[in-house]
Image: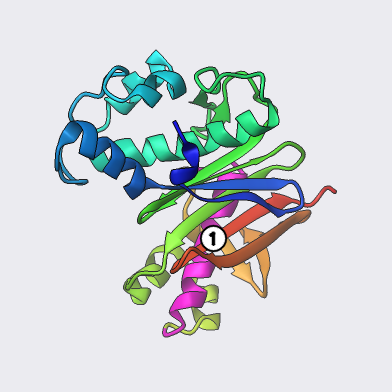
Amino acid sequence: MNLKRFIAFSGKIYQETEICIIDIYKLFKVYNSQFLKHSSFFSKPTKIKAADFYFLGNFFSAREIKTINGFKTIKKQFEWMSARIGIKNLVKNKYPHLSFRSIETEKDIYGAPLIKNLPFLNISISHSGKYAVSAINEKQRIGIDLEELKCLNTKYLLYAGFSKKEKKLTCPENYFEILKLWTIKESYLKYIKKGFNESLKKVEIIKNKIYHNGVPIKNVCTESFFLLENYVVSFVYENNI
């Protein structure tokens, strides 16, 4: 399979962090044209077999295909596959001797993803809209989040994820700033391997500094940038270099 047609961006973005962004819709379009025959991206899934799409057998193990077939919509299936294809591509570039099938992700005790045979490798994944982003770093812990800059209710975002102190410092009309701060919060929770197990309100971004449960967090840095038309990417990384 020619991965290049599905990759929207791949490369090093800061220090040792490398990311790969997969176009989920392109991946679905190729599969749909050959096997699903005009099914909707939001349809209920049909069982995917390795023989149906030749790259599945080369890229995904039997255990991973079982996971893919456990999702309840085609959308969820292709979001999951796209993020793992990104991870596999990044790891394969670093360790060419490994096969794609052997580069499997699994969850740690907190539910955070890790590479089964390379637990020392720091990884993080996210997806939004038509893209999935995967990140790896050999030396620093990382957390990454991708969000589409679509029209959302800023009042809801402030209510759902911001503390009283943050609300006082944040203009509710500044949509781009609110979404950037939201992605930093999400990235930090992935960085500490809490994910959805911790409230976003417990993570505050005050004057570009992260506070968790009111305590300033040391030795972490954040980066945010706009990428691929109307998407914002933020990542948090360990400042140990």
Magenta stretch prevailing secondary structure: helix
43 and 217: which one is in front?
A: 43
Residue 75 appears anywhere in the view: yes
Q: Which residue shows up at 45% across the image and 24% down it?
A: 59
102 and 99: which one is in front?
A: 99
Task: Classify residue 123 by image quadrant.
Answer: top right
Q: Amino acid at mark 1?
A: Val
Does the magenta run of residues contain 162?
no
**Residue at image mark 1:** 233
Crowd around label 1: few <14 · some 14–19 · many ≥20 (10 Å): many
Q: Is residue 81 left or right of residue 31?
A: right
How far across and how far down the image is residue 226, in percent? Answer: 54, 68
Does the magenta run of residues contain 179?
yes
Q: Residue furthest top?
A: 62
Q: Is residue 160 left or right of residue 136?
A: left
Q: Which residue shows up at 43% across the image and 17% down it?
A: 61
Image label count: 1
How far across and how far down the image is residue 118, in percent? Answer: 65, 23
Q: Is residue 65 left or right of residue 13?
A: left
Residue 72 appears anywhere in the view: no
What range of the chain is rendered magenta?
A: 173-195
Q: Which residue shows up at 38% across the image and 37% down it?
A: 80
124 and 217: which one is in front?
A: 124
> Which quadrant, please, contains the N terminus?
top left
How far across and how far down the image is residue 102, in percent? Answer: 54, 17
Q: Which residue shows up at 52% across the image and 82% down it?
A: 168
